[in-house]
Amino acid sequence: SVATPSSVPTSLQSFLASPKQLLINGVWQNAKSGKSFDVYDPATDQVVAQVAQGEAADVNLAVQAARQAFDNGPWSKMTASQRGRLIWKIGDLIEQNADELAQLETLDNGKPLGVAKVADVALAADMFRYMAGWATKIEGNTIPLNVPYAPGGEFQAFTLKEPVGVVGQIIPWNFPLLMAAWKLGPALATGCTIVLKPAEQTPLSAIRLGELVQEAGVPDGVVNIVTGFGETAGAAIASHDDVDKVAFTGSTEVGKLIIQAATGNLKKVTLELGGKSPNVVFDDANIDEAVAGAADAIFFNQGQVCSAGSRLFVQKGIYDEVVAGVSEIAANMKVGSGFDESTQMGPLVSREQFDRVTAFLKAGVAEGAEASAGGAAIDRPGYFVQPTVLKNASSDMSVVREEIFGPVVAAMPFGDESDLVSQANNSSYGLAAGIWTRDISKAHRFAKQVKAGTVWINCYSIFDAALPFGGYKQSGWGREMGHAALENYLQTKSVCISL
Ligand code: ADP
């Protein structure tokens, strides 16, 4: 058992004191190996829980349970309306337990509690409700045929939309509950069954969500949760021959491993991967809003957002003013424990992430960038770094090319619209982009030309369950959210009848 550090709210202590097990076929159980792993509070570097360490043997059991629930279980026999009501209920239960879930996110991930509540938890509840509505609206088409080699033949043809089957879902640590919701919502709405693996850094809210899924009345085996490490539990899901589809959110590097692992049975793959998104400020923008928006685009969630505006392009005439404005916000930001109400930015999620971000800060300065705010770690327990603005950045620097996944923005000037688009698209990623301008035509031209799955005009980081999200280029395959997400979990079957 784990001694409870002083950082843990008393309201969480009974949940944390109970064993943290795997959910397989409706039964909470230890890993077959009996092993568990430590979970840390990133604000204190202290262990707050121990969680069952699922591996291939546990994944096998979870896949068997999901297969049984899909092929023979009550799930496939329920009406879409019954499924929809259960999914809606999960949303209700998330809302009813919003405080506890937000506290778990802050404890496990480090993010400010207020943000966890209004963003992560509220969006997660909304995702289930949005997807609950889709359950009854999954329809095929009727299709007129003109078969050239059957002149005069009369046919009736239509498509059926069927759930793809057993799906593996592997999620990251930056929005632990919300990423589970993005994955589970459409899979449940389409009638799939699931093996979900949360990130090893942040498994707690997924475990609590598993309890809520049971409380909602979702039948055993429909949602199985296997906590554990990527190279073992994650790899076992991605390579499993009885998994019909894998959905992954995480790094581009691991996304490529998932594709390789999926080749055995050619399971369907969707990926939501890294980004290095351009955020562009034109000199005709509302500068105050653009400055605040540019700071928010990178510092939200400690910069641990795949769509963060990490390349800031500012038109030459206002470059100094905008960089100074964003730097001032960075320098004045209150960094601290997510449980402290005045905190605007929390710690990074893990020691590993802290090492990675601080290494990038050193590399950026060594390559010639200059920190106009921040630039270093903060000397205190926990994984804290300063919100950082790097100016004099250029396209050959690692801090401009590579995803840092931390609160570090690289600022670069541009001349006019024509050089901007090629600079903005000069990236192996294509997840999101932002543009700040009062010129509506310029904004629309940019939106059409930029190679990104989401374009924000005079705003940034606006997410909605109805709005598809996903990447061009090495930012991924497929779209999450919106009705686009349902396609990831459906097969289309053509049926043709001779009349
Ligand atoms: P990060 O590097 O930011 O931690 P990852 O892409 O490594 O992000 O992790 C995202 C998710 O992928 C986590 O749930 C992690 O456990 C999982 N994962 C990591 N490596 C593998 C792998 N080889 N196969 C399957 N899943 C993996």
Image (cartoon, grey):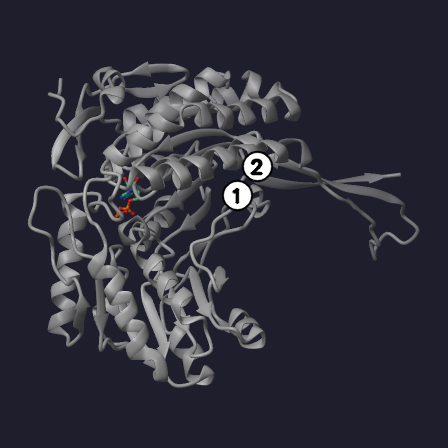
Query: In the rendered structure, which amino acid carries the disc numbered 1?
Result: Ala
Residue 280 disc label = none
Residue at the image position 23 percent from the left and 66 percent from the top? 389
Q: Where is residue 157 in the image (x, y as percent from the top left)?
A: 79, 43
Q: Going 17% across and 33% down the picture, which residue do you hit?
A: 40
* Res. 342 image quadrant: top left
Quadrant of residue 338 within the rendered picture: top left
Q: Quadrant of the N terminus?
A: top left
Query: Mark 2 Cα within 10 Å, few/some/many (few <14, many 20+)?
Result: many
Name the residue beneath numbered marker 2: 130
The amino acid sitting under disc 2 is Tyr
Identity of the residue drawn at 22% across and 58% down: 332
Residue at 54 percent across and 17 percent down: it is 73
Q: How crowded is mark 1: few (under 14 residues within 10 Å), some or many (20 or more)?
A: many
Where's residue 262, x and y in %? Answer: 39, 44
Count of numbered circles in the view: 2
| Figure quadrant of the C terminus | top right
The residue that label 1 is drawn on is: 465
Q: In this view, does 463 lie to the left or right of 318?
A: right
> Which quarter of the rendered image does ligand 1 occupy?
top left
Q: Is residue 468 visible?
A: yes
Q: Is mark 2 on a helix, strand or loop?
A: helix
Quick one: SS at disc 1?
loop
Left or right relative to 294: residue 16? left
Tell me if residue 462 comes above or below residue 232 in the rendering: below
Q: Residue 112: where, in percent of width, then height?
A: 28, 41
